[in-house]
Image (tube, helix red, strand yellow):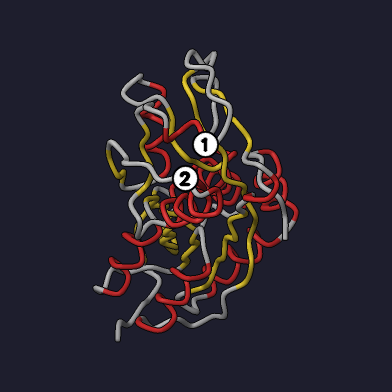
Amino acid sequence: MIVLTVAIVTGCGGEQDRVVVFAASSLTDVFDRLEDEFEAAEPDVDIVVTTGGSSSLVAQLIDGAPVDVLATADRVTMERAVEAASIRGTPVELARNELVIAVESGNPLGLDGLGDLADGPVVVIAAPEVPAGAYAEEALDCAGVAIEPASYEPNVRAVVSKVALGEADAGLVYSTDIDDRVDALELPIACRVLADYEIVAVSDGDATGRFMAFVAGPSGDGALLDAGFDLP
């Protein structure tokens, strides 16, 4: 069992409560914005955000890393955290996302869907233990498509980077990770995969509670919607 406390740090204006947030890499932009907005509203709190693959973050939490808030890209990984670590709160649904195929800008190979991924393009996906990797395998299985990925990446943003840099022709990613460097192909309706994000308060400090309320309120909803997520 790990014992979590809200750390105290000294800032220019005196003491600050520190809230450590572990969030799935696809939530990077959302929590960067919420960090800035919350600290502007409550300068007595220092929000420290670490993003990465959900499975890697949970492994660190279980190993004893001090964490106050955890946000994962799937329920399975959250359940593993709840079973293996000391979690003070109850997980709640944060947002929803959709899996898409990322291709090079302009789609030079003319790829049309999941079936084309088996016909020779260089494809990368997230590692199977990462939510995005598990979602990718679910979509491929649904379509009856077998591929040999060129690589398994540690998180979904690494998949996007491989495609954007021309190191891969395609990758399975979340719709919110599509940027102006790549294009997106939607999955067929029959094999549509929705990602369910969850968030939980790991510690029960006052600052943690205030930040959780902030994320659950209009500011959090606005950041998620602006980033392309759907609300639960």
The answer to which of 152 and 54 lies nearer the viewer is: 152
- The residue at 48%/61% (across/down) is 72
- The residue at 43%/29% (across/down) is 170
Mark 1 and mark 2 lie on one chain; the one further toward the N terminus is 1
Query: Is 79 placed above or below 135 here?
Result: below
- Label 2 Cα crowd, 10 Å radius (few <14 / some 14-19 / many 20+): some
Q: Amino acid at mark 2?
A: Val
Q: Position of residue 54 (x, y in %)?
A: 40, 59
Residue at numbered disc 1: 115
Q: Amino acid at mark 1?
A: Gly
Quadrant housing residue 59: bottom left
Q: Position of residue 166 (x, y in %)?
A: 35, 19
- The residue at 44%/59% (across/down) is 21
Q: Position of residue 167 (x, y in %)?
A: 31, 23
Q: Judging from the image, what secondary structure is the residue with disc 2 in?
A: loop
Residue 196 left/right relative to 132: right
The answer to which of 55 and 201 lies nearer the viewer is: 55
Number of numbered tags placed on the structure image? 2
Q: Position of residue 65 (x, y in %)?
A: 28, 68
Per the model, the C-alpha gap separating discs 1 and 2 is 6 Å
Residue at numbered disc 2: 145
Quadrant housing residue 113: top right
- Label 1 Cα crowd, 10 Å radius (few <14 / some 14-19 / many 20+): some
